[in-house]
Image: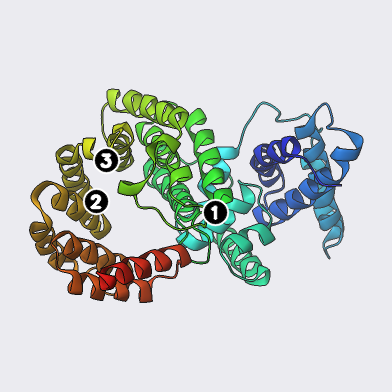
């Protein structure tokens, strides 16, 4: 029997809390994470049959502790480590009020890890996804993903960073890493970079869930609220991004009646509250741009001058060439494609070989009526992208222009 949605959601919520307690109690993140996965599997098998226990967190803590003690007893220094573990063992209800989710997130986003490793470890340790689910999402063999996660845990262990909340001096850079990892997870789910599917809702949904968790724990942090607002305002358009056959529908051609007004309302409320607190950051700026798109009932109502101004601020704040690429789109809408094409010339070195540079350049040539150049760039972009839906979209766009 498989666990239903209620049990799955409960297990995902409890997983990082239980991991935090066990990692702190036994002092071994790697072993604790493995024990939590075994406890989650046991719960997913038994709870649908026996019912959810009155204290599900305590049940998982007790089961995970037993798993860890079994591992301790199997090692060569059995007697010494058994005694140590026995001293550390606490009743199932202990630490019930302390939620370690944020600490686990900070640990998974360790500065020694690559973004790919941090994403994988976060999805497993905090998101509660299995190694097979993560491997499937990123289109790699399960064994490959297992090795990636194992290496990440070993790197954390080798760093000898204690399991604890970060010191105040560590707070800003580590929180920035956490938000960046959540942002990357969402983006990969909302617009898959590889494969046949346009969306991977299990990733975007998990990123939103985890960001909601961080927002609950840090309700006064404007950038956390900004990131959550950005995700909601962007995800609100997901239902209109694909046609019946999964084909990509660009923003200016979407049926806006399909946009999720509830998510838009929640996102705008979060953004307004965050901006009112002052100190505007990059996620708030991106959310403000998304809000301007979402507020426009028709594509011609879009406030492109305001979007252009916000992209200018974001570009100065981040220096990110992809932001410049997006600013070029706003330049085209406000000042015309000729000015936008000139701006793209500044990106030839920084985004050399990136399919989006060719795709946007093709769009500007199409706006200017230069169809042969547009076809050339659309074709080049289609050859470079690893996303099936984007490749089909670009190829179709080029074919229509060829047909006249």
Mark 1, residues whose alpha carbon is within 10 Å: few (<14), some, or many (≥20)? Answer: some
- Sequence-first disc among 3 and 2: 3
Q: Is residue 95 visible?
A: yes
Q: Identify the residue at horizontal 66%, vertical 47% (top origin).
A: 128
Q: Identify the residue at horizontal 43%, vertical 27% (top origin).
A: 266
**Outermost residue, right side:** 50
Residue that numbered label 2 is attached to: 318
Q: Nearer the viewer, mark 3 or mark 2?
A: 3
Instruction: Report whether 182 appears left or right of 360.
Output: right
Q: How far apart are marks 1 and 3 (CA)?
A: 26 Å
- The image quadrant that residue 384 belongs to is bottom left
x%, y% of residue 211?
49, 39
Q: How far apart are marks 3 and 2 (CA)?
A: 28 Å
Residue that numbered label 1 is attached to: 200
Instruction: Report whether 175 appears left or right of 39.
Output: left
- Sequence-first disc among 1 and 3: 1
* Numbered label tally: 3
Label 1: state its secondary structure: loop
Residue that numbered label 3 is attached to: 299
User: Is 283 above or below relative to 34?
Assistant: above
**Outermost residue, front side:** 404
Are the residues at dot 1 and dot 3 in contact (C-beta closer than 8 Å)?
no
């Amino acid at each position: 029997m498989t666990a239903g949605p209620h049990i799955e959601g409960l297990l995902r919520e409890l997983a990082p809390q239980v991991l935090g307690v066990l990692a702190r109690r036994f002092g071994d993140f790697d072993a604790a994470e493995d024990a939590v996965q075994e406890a989650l599997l046991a719960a997913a098998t038994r709870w649908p049959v026996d019912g959810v226990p009155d204290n599900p967190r305590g049940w998982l803590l007790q089961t995970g502790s037993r798993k860890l003690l079994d591992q301790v007893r199997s090692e060569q220094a059995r007697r010494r480590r058994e005694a140590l573990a026995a001293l550390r063992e606490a009743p199932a209800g202990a630490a019930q009020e302390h939620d370690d989710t944020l600490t686990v997130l900070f640990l998974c986003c360790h500065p020694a890890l690559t973004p790919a490793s941090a994403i994988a470890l976060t999805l497993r340790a905090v998101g509660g996804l299995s190694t097979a689910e993560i491997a499937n999402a990123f289109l790699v063999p399960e064994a490959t993903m297992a090795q990636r996660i194992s290496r990440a845990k070993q790197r954390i262990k080798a760093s000898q960073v204690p399991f604890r909340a970060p010191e105040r001096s560590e707070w800003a850079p580590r929180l920035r890493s956490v938000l960046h990892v959540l942002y990357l997870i969402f983006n990969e789910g909302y617009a898959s970079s590889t494969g046949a599917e346009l969306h991977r809702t299990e990733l975007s949904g998990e990123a939103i869930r985890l960001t909601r968790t961080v927002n609950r724990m840090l309700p006064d942090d404007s950038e956390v609220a900004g990131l959550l607002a950005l995700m909601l305002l962007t995800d609100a358009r997901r239902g209109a991004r694909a046609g019946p056959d999964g084909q990509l529908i660009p923003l200016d051609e979407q049926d806006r009646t399909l946009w999720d007004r509830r998510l838009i309302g929640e996102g705008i409320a979060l953004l307004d509250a965050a901006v009112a607190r002052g100190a505007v950051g990059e996620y708030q700026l991106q959310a403000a741009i998304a809000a301007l798109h979402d507020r426009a009932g028709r594509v011609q109502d879009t406030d492109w001058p305001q979007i252009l101004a916000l992209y200018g601020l974001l570009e100065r704040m981040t220096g990110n060439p992809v932001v410049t690429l997006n600013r070029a789109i706003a330049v085209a809408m406000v000042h015309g494609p000729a000015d936008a094409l000139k701006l793209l010339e500044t990106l030839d070195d920084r985004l050399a070989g990136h399919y989006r540079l060719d795709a946007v350049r093709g769009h500007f040539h199409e706006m200017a009526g230069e169809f042969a150049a547009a076809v050339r760039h659309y074709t080049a972009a289609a050859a470079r992208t690893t996303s099936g839906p984007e490749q089909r979209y670009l190829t179709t766009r080029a074919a229509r222009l060829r047909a006249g």
